[in-house]
Image (cartoon, grey):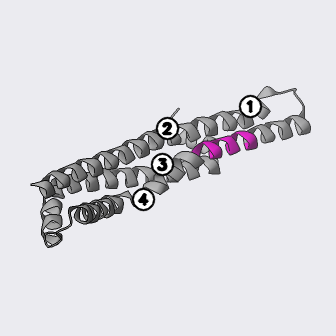
Amino acid sequence: MRIIDYIDQGGAIMYILLIFNIIGFAILGWKVLAIISFKKESNNLLIKIKENFSDITDKQTKLSLVKDEISASVHSLEGGLNTVKIIASVSPLLGLLGTVVGILSAFQVIADKGLSDPSLFAGGIAMALVTTVGGLVVAIPHFIGYNYLVSSLDDIEMKLEKEASSILKA
């Protein structure tokens, strides 16, 4: 069975999950590229920060302002990650919704036609299982990607703050 057959079997909920998956992976790819680019330019950011705050004599104030500047720069990279987090959170719920709809459909067929032909209600059971799997297949990589990128941004911020502190002390 091809993937598109599974998507068709899951109905509208699977198409919503497919759209979520495409959007989420596009954002994850964009963020990875943005982080790589930011890492390459981080030395320029440190030089710019050093120049901008060179006239401040109080070391504590200077350090606080530098940390705020670095935090703001890293925070600008976080745009879009909330969407990935939402996709990771909502996808299993959509899978569960598909499960409930599929089971409901199976019970309606049983109520209308009885249990004489199991193939009649098997479609509803199949929809229930496919949407559950679909929701998890979408959620898991987005959850992993979100956590990895947030952790990477935290590491970048800490590294930049440490480098800035050593530059300012010199």
Please state the total of marks drawn on the protein image: 4
- Which residue is the site of mark 3? 21
Q: Is residue 60 above or below residue 121?
A: below
Q: Residues within 10 Å of mark 2 (few under 14, many from 20)?
A: some
Percent coordinates x, y for residue 166 in the rendering: 15, 51
- Which residue is the site of mark 4? 80
Depth check, mark 1 against mark 2: the one in front is 2
Q: Is residue 52 above or below residue 86?
A: below
Percent coordinates x, y for residue 88 in the rendering: 52, 46
Q: Residues within 10 Å of mark 4 (few under 14, many from 20)?
A: some
- The numbered disc on residue 140 is 2
Who is closer to the viewer here, 107 or 66? Answer: 66
Who is closer to the viewer here, 6 or 88? Answer: 88
Q: Is residue 23 above or below residue 10?
A: below
Depth check, mark 1 against mark 4: the one in front is 4
Q: Residues within 10 Å of mark 3 (few under 14, many from 20)?
A: many
Asked if residue 13 lies left or right of residue 153, the reply is right
Give the mark, 3 or 2, whose residue is nearer the N terminus.
Answer: 3
Give the mark, 1 or 4, whose residue is nearer the N terminus.
Answer: 4
Is residue 100 a member of the stretch shown in magenta? Answer: yes
- The numbered disc on residue 122 is 1
Q: Mark 1 and 2 residues: CB-CB less than 8 Å, in contact? A: no
Taken as a whole, is the magenta stretch helix, strand or loop?
Answer: helix
- Helix, strand or loop at mark 3: helix
Percent coordinates x, y for residue 154 in the rendering: 34, 48
Percent coordinates x, y for residue 95 in the rendering: 63, 42
Q: What is the spatial separation of the Cα atoms under label 1 and label 4, in whole angstroms? A: 40 Å
Residue occupying image coordinates x 14% and y 64%: 50
Q: Amino acid at mark 2?
A: Ile
Is residue 17 a member of the stretch shown in magenta? Answer: no
- Helix, strand or loop at mark 1: helix
Give the mark, 2 or 4, whose residue is nearer the N terminus.
Answer: 4
